[in-house]
Image (spheres, rainbow, N blue to C red):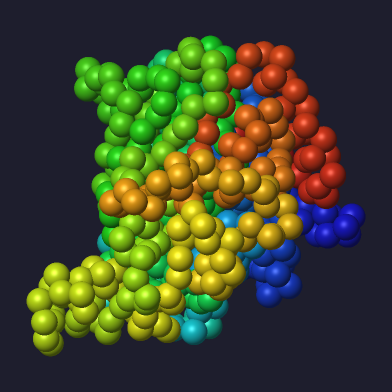
């Protein structure tokens, strides 16, 4: 490990005298790839240098290191297929950058000269767009108009000076690739620190995927989504945002998908202080607790964490608070099999026969997860057959009740539940039988109410506003965990270390 560490230091430190054409070798690329895989900074509490900006934490996503080449900050992104564990045991095939989707977080300072080397390790052409950046047209990454697409195996070197500040992001400018995960956070720290000053600063990217049980590849043409993620994780796999009681908190929310997400915070009012265009004037800040983050937008919200507790932060669209099971509720779960998806034309409502509400078409319209299945299995999830193995065949990748680490428990339903039209809705989708506290155990979850994980799904995490003793305890646990990790990552505001 120590040789790897030394190697990294060389990459980061020895850069000054090198020609600008110098780029990382394949071996170094493997290195940086492995580094990202360790996810060491996603949870790390970065230290602050004198007068340097507060680094933004991106829970569950790593930070992209850079090297200085003269006065240019040089980053290296590799577009590639990735295996992303979006939920315990649910490892799916996405496309991302440097081993993850979303890709690693880039942080720079306003005024920086930045170079980003983009290598394409995908089997098809790609292009990198710097969303909202005021840069020369030929650096915009619009394939076909500002540049040729980067062919498979190819490379494009982007370089520009950034005079903006705010919450930005980078993404592939190929539409279907966007739906495979190809986005990352790009923070531009302001020259003049924002006022009032924030004690904690977080960023979260929202994404959505349509992935059938048994299948690991998202259907990027689908219009409905069964896996909703914050920073590449679905609840309860997300790492909560840890805050000390009384601190001022900024959360930067970024959305790239097919839906707009109303993000709601419990227990506090916040103000929207920034958009994808940068800081907003204070005169526009009105109180709220839900902010609609539209597709391709970012929103910064700020609040004083004045109310101690474990507060949910989640998308308020009901179907975005679920994991993969939204088709298994209510009357639809009572039939002996039903259409589970159709070919594209019919899935999108271009019917060949029958009406849109017929038994043949009704349940499948707008769901369109058709690839790989035409009918869902006959199944029962009535109270009397709650442990029917058929139920688990139907969701083999969902840790079942018999799964190790899953807590045993019974949903609380009344004796005549089956007689009530509409039953079941949430009875088998959340609650004690879905709890998996141990499977998602980590310092940031320490002290949560037992069974909490059974109620967290989709775009859902916690802002934990903790009294000093509890806060310190979790920071201590986190430090211990970090101590076991081999390398330190470099953060913005610590540039002096590279020079
Ligand atoms: Cu949503």
Q: Where is residue 152 in the image (x, y as percent from the top left)?
A: 48, 83
Q: Nearer the viewer, residue 237 or 438?
A: 438
Quarter of the rendering occupied by the N terminus: bottom right
Q: In this view, does 383 lie to the left or right of 39?
A: left
Q: Nearer the viewer, residue 448 or 46?
A: 448
Note whether 440 is above or below 312 in the view shown: below
Residue at image point 56% right, 66% down: 388
Residue 471, by quadrant, is top right
Determine if residue 56 is in view: no
Residue 331, by quadrant, is bottom left
- Which residue is farthest bottom? 352
Residue at image point 65% right, 27% down: 49
Determine if residue 404 is in view: yes
Q: Where is residue 271 in the image (x, y as percent from the top left)?
A: 32, 23
Q: Position of residue 431 (x, y in %)?
A: 53, 43
Residue at image point 49% right, 27% down: 311
Note whether 312 is above or below 129 in the view shown: above
Q: Position of residue 315 (x, y in %)?
A: 37, 42
Q: Which of 368 and 114 is in front in this view?
A: 368
Quarter of the rendering occupied by the C terminus: top right
Residue at image point 32% right, 64% down: 332
Q: Nearer the viewer, residue 6 or 106?
A: 106
């Amino acid at each position: 490990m120590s040789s790897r560490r030394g190697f990294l230091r060389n990459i980061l430190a020895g850069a000054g005298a090198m020609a600008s054409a110098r780029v990382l070798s394949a071996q170094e690329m493997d290195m940086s790839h492995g580094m990202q895989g360790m996810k060491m900074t996603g949870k790390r509490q970065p230290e602050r240098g004198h007068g340097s900006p507060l680094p933004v934490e991106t829970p569950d996503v790593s930070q992209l290191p850079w090297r200085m080449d003269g006065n240019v900050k040089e980053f290296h992104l590799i577009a590639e297929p990735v295996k992303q564990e979006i939920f315990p045991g649910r490892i799916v095939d996405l496309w991302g950058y440097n081993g993850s989707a979303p890709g690693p977080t880039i942080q720079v300072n306003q005024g920086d000269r930045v170079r980003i080397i983009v290598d394409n390790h995908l089997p098809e052409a790609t292009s990198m767009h710097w969303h909202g950046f005021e840069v020369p047209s030929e650096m915009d990454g619009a394939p076909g108009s500002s540049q040729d697409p980067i062919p498979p195996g190819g490379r494009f070197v982007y370089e520009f000076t950034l005079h903006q500040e705010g919450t930005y992001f980078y993404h592939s400018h190929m539409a279907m690739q966007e739906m495979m995960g190809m986005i990352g956070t790009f923070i531009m720290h302001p020259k003049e620190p924002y006022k009032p000053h924030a004690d904690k600063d977080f960023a979260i990217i929202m994404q959505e995927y349509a992935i059938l049980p048994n299948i690991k590849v998202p259907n990027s043409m689908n219009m409905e989504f069964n896996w909703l993620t914050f920073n590449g994780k679905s609840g309860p796999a997300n790492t909560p945002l840890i805050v000390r009681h009384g601190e001022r908190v900024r959360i930067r929310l970024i959305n790239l998908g097919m839906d707009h997400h109303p993000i709601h915070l419990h227990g506090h009012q916040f103000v929207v202080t920034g958009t994808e265009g940068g800081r907003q004037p204070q005169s526009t800040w009105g109180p709220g607790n839900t902010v609609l983050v539209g597709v391709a937008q970012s929103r910064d919200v700020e609040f004083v964490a004045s109310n101690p507790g474990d507060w949910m932060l989640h998308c308020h669209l009901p179907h975005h608070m679920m994991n993969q099971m939204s088709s298994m509720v209510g009357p639809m779960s009572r039939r002996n099999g039903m259409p589970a998806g159709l070919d594209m034309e019919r899935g999108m409502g271009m019917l060949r026969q029958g009406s849109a509400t017929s038994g043949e078409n009704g349940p499948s319209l707008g769901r369109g997860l058709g690839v790989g299945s035409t009918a869902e299995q006959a199944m029962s999830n009535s109270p009397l057959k709650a442990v029917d193995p058929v139920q688990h065949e139907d969701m083999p990748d969902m840790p079942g009740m018999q799964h190790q680490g899953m807590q045993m428990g019974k949903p609380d339903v009344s004796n005549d539940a089956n007689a009530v039209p509409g039953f079941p809705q949430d009875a088998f989708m959340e609650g004690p039988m879905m709890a998996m506290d141990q499977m998602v155990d980590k310092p940031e979850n320490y002290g949560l109410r037992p069974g909490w994980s059974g109620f967290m799904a989709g775009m859902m995490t916690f802002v934990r506003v903790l009294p000093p003793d509890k806060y310190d305890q979790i920071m201590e646990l986190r430090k211990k965990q970090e101590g076991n990790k081999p390398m330190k990552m470099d953060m913005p505001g610590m540039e002096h270390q590279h020079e």
